Image: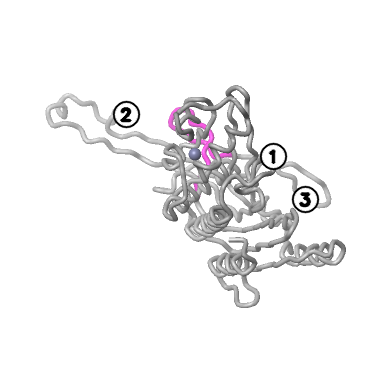
């Protein structure tokens, strides 16, 4: 089963993805973006949140969710440090004698068995032999929706950080030194963003090398359930991106769709208006031509008023199909 989710969210004054700091100036990520303006195609630069950033948050929530359900998560993934099994040292804890074997199938099996996050999110072991496991989920950048891309903004906001000066030093100090008051700028973005996230549920718990099942059927279902639950948690809580402690974006999810198909299918990109209906048309066509079953959930339709409604309906459907 393949799950494809598309979301639009409004974010006013966000600093979700900062890319560099030059002196006291932190820059927001910007990307080139195609827009049509007065009949001409143009490239403009717009604020963006990277797929890496969203994937990091998703995997952090997955680590929590899986651990809470007594599924295995390795120590580093549990701490949100996704070095994963990149080398012998980081892979070692997944094997009984703390020694990484030298057969690719055994390496993959040990890692997948002992870490839900690396099973679902993949890893790249650069030892001998190298072993690669592709992530079972794919996520796009979050980009402003087409209709308002030209109005999306990045604006630096001025802030001051004050330091307490010890009394003894107070007489000696010069007024306005950097130690007392540090001025800094943070670029903040404002836009309606959209992103797509796909999950290939069939890949979870299955060897990418042999296609064999590496954990029990029950464990596979539990891991799939945790994966969907962590996605629901991420959408519901808005816990992704950086600087949430002081730049928690104001806004929230304004559109959400989720499709479940037997084979890979990606919903129409939510950067386009009408993506809900367009996805529907495509799904109907695929179902007819390929004789496949599908389910489609749209926020705002059939009583699905909130993102939580959509995600719980999705989970219930997967449960009814014995997938989770
Ligand atoms: Zn891990």
Q: Position of residue 88 (x, y in %)?
A: 51, 25
Of residues 174 and 275, the one drawn nearer to the viewer in this rendering: 275
| Element under disc 3 | strand
Distance between the alpha carbons at the discs numbered 1 and 3? 50 Å
Q: How has the structure been colored for display?
A: one colour
Point 66% across, 68% down: residue: 297
Label drawn at residue 210:
1
Of residues 161 and 90, the one drawn nearer to the viewer in this rendering: 90
Badge 2 is on which residue?
178
Q: Magenta part of the protein: which range?
A: 14-29
> Is tag 1's residue or tag 3's residue first in the polypeptide sequence?
3
Label 1 near label 2: C-beta < 8 Å?
Answer: no
Mark 2 crowdedness (10 Å alpha carbons): few <14, some 14-19, many ≥20: few
Image position of 163 (left or right of 84): left
Point 56% across, 51% down: residue: 216
| Element under disc 2 | loop
Image position of 110 (left or right of 167): right
The reply to whether the residue tagged 3 has its Cβ within 8 angstroms of ligand 1 is no
Farthest residue in the bottom direction?
A: 303
Distance between the alpha carbons at the discs numbered 3 and 2? 45 Å
Label 3 near label 1: C-beta < 8 Å?
Answer: no
Q: Position of residue 283 (x, y in %)?
A: 78, 64
Between circles 2 and 1, the one closer to the viewer is: 1
The reply to whether the residue tagged 1 has its Cβ within 8 angstroms of ligand 1 is no
Badge 3 is on which residue?
37
Point 39% across, 48% down: residue: 245
Mark 1 crowdedness (10 Å alpha carbons): few <14, some 14-19, many ≥20: few
Q: Is residue 28 magenta?
A: yes
Mark 3 crowdedness (10 Å alpha carbons): few <14, some 14-19, many ≥20: few
Q: Position of residue 14 (x, y in %)?
A: 50, 49
Farthest residue in the top direction?
A: 128
> Is tag 3's residue or tag 2's residue first in the polypeptide sequence?
3
């Amino acid at each position: 089963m393949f799950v494809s989710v598309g979301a639009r969210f409004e974010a006013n004054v966000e600093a979700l993805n900062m890319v560099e700091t030059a002196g006291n100036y932190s820059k927001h990520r910007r990307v080139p973006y195609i827009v049509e303006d007065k009949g001409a195609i143009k490239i403009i630069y717009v604020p963006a949140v990277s797929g890496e950033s969203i994937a990091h948050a998703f995997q952090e929530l997955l680590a929590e969710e899986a651990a809470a359900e007594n599924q295995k998560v390795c120590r580093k993934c549990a701490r949100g440090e996704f070095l994963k099994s990149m080398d012998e040292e980081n892979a070692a804890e997944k094997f009984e004698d703390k020694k990484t074997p030298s057969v690719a199938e055994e390496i993959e099996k040990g890692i997948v068995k002992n870490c839900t996050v690396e099973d679902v999110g993949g890893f790249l072991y650069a030892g001998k032999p190298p072993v690669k496991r592709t992530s079972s989920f794919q996520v796009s950048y979050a980009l402003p929706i087409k209709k308002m891309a030209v109005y999306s903004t990045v604006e630096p906001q001025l802030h001051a950080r004050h330091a307490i000066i010890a009394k003894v030093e107070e007489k000696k100090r010069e007024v306005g030194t950097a130690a007392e008051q540090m001025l800094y700028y943070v670029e903040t973005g404002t836009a309606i963003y959209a992103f797509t996230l796909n999950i290939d549920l069939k890949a979870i718990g299955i060897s990418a090398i042999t296609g064999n099942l590496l954990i029990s059927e029950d464990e596979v279902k539990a891991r799939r359930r945790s994966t969907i639950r962590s996605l629901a948690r991420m959408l519901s809580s808005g816990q992704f991106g950086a600087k949430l402690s002081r730049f928690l974006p104001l806004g929230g999810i304004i559109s959400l769709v989720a499709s479940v198909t037997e084979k890979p299918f990606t919903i129409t990109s939510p950067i386009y208006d009408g993506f809900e209906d367009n996805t529907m048309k495509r799904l109907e066509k695929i179902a007819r031509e390929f004789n496949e079953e599908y389910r489609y959930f749209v926020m705002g339709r059939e009583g699905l008023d909130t993102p939580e409604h959509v995600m719980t309906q999705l989970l219930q459907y997967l449960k009814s199909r014995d997938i989770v």
